[in-house]
Image (spheres, rainbow, N blue to C red):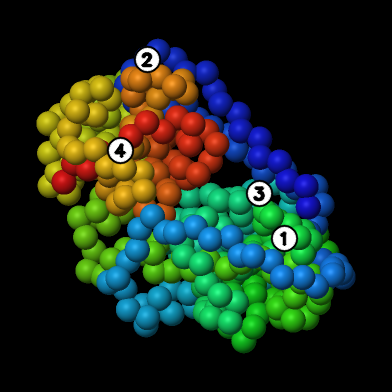
Amino acid sequence: MNKRLVTTTLALTLGFSSLGVIPGLAEVKQNPSAVASDSLGAVSSIINPIKASAATTNVYNNQKAVDAKADQIINFGKSLIGKATYASKYNYEKLQFRCASFMAYIFESNGIDLGSRDEDYMIKQGTYVPRNQLQKGDLVFFGSSPKATVPSHVGIYIGDNKILHMANFKLNIAISDLNSTSFYRDNYMSARRVLPSLMPSNPATKADKIVENAYNLMNKVKMGSINDERNMKFTGVGYVNYIYKLNGVNLGGKTSVKDLSKLGTTVSRSKLKKGDLIFLNSTAGSSTPTRVAIYAGEQRIIVPSSDGISSRVLLSDYYNSQYMYAKRVF
């Protein structure tokens, strides 16, 4: 499958950039052809799995909680059979999805944010799982051919050697056995375990609560040039101050990204933890931070923008190029 990620970046205004607010980004994954047809054939070969270490791990969730969450996600996905349809562009309200946006939707609807609707980024989250050790809730990836080096399709493992996925325009949501056709047998690429690493700790830590509060307020705040807690209006920095204050972390009421960036201790990108502050610039190579985001674990960031609050992944080209450094403030 030929895939293209089109990112439209709106021009920064001086007012928003100086207040740490990121202009809205429209990310559209275009996919004009169906990729997981049960009639696809391929020549058998061995594919080296793509490996990427998790940015965070969660040792507090027991297997019972993980299994319960996996069942919840899977059952919700099954409930959409006959309702949701395959489409080149996702539309949550109309229940129209590609394979990856369908995964994002069923996880997000059950409290697990993947931070992306793109299988290219999903395959770099969580931890690598050998094919013979798959468990319910794992994400399973396929290439467009046995020799493909990037994924073109993704589904969720539901047990009994089967996946639930948004297959193609003809089948829509399907349950497929991994040995049912040459496509699934030969084009299998890798699997990633995102549960429990994307789940809150049990009991929840301060970092978990910060991230949870940030998610819960996504659709309840208005972004602008003033801070008004009573009416839930914030600048980018004001929003961050408010979220941390709710959880007993005093950021000193800083009003600019530059002042906020002077707090805490610098953390290397490879050692990021939930609750760290991520500082970004508006121009690649600039030495001055103009924006701030909250690290949510597994390469996800919660970003104040002119459109509100959104969840993104640091792995995307845009944020990867704008990343400057991170600070740990508690």
Q: Mark 2 or mark 3: name the one nearer the start of the chain.
A: 2
**Residue 248 in the image: above or below residue 186:** above
Q: Nearer the viewer, residue 236 or 137?
A: 137
Q: Which residue is mark 2?
A: 15
Instruction: Name the element at disc 1.
Output: loop
Q: Mark 1 or mark 4: name the one nearer the start of the chain.
A: 1
Res. 143 mark: 1
Q: Report how far apart the C-alphas of labels 3 and 1 lie in the structure.
A: 21 Å
**Mark 4 belongs to which amino acid?**
Ala
Disc 2 to disc 1: CB gap under 8 Å: no
Name which quarter of the figure residue 30 lies in.
top right
Query: Residue at image x 49%, y 57%?
Result: 52
Q: Mark 3 or mark 1: name the one nearer the start of the chain.
A: 3
Task: Give the mark toward the camera: 3 or 4.
Answer: 4
Pick out the residue farthest to the bottom.
Answer: 160
Disc 2 to disc 4: CB gap under 8 Å: no
**Mark 2 belongs to which amino acid?**
Gly
Q: Nearer the viewer, residue 242 or 126?
A: 126
Q: Mark 2 or mark 1: name the one nearer the start of the chain.
A: 2
Q: Report how far apart the C-alphas of labels 2 and 1 lie in the structure.
A: 44 Å
Q: Report how far apart the C-alphas of labels 3 and 4 lie in the structure.
A: 32 Å
Q: Position of residue 294 (x, y in %)?
A: 32, 42
**Residue 160 in the image: above or below residue 3:** below
Q: Which residue is mark 4?
A: 326
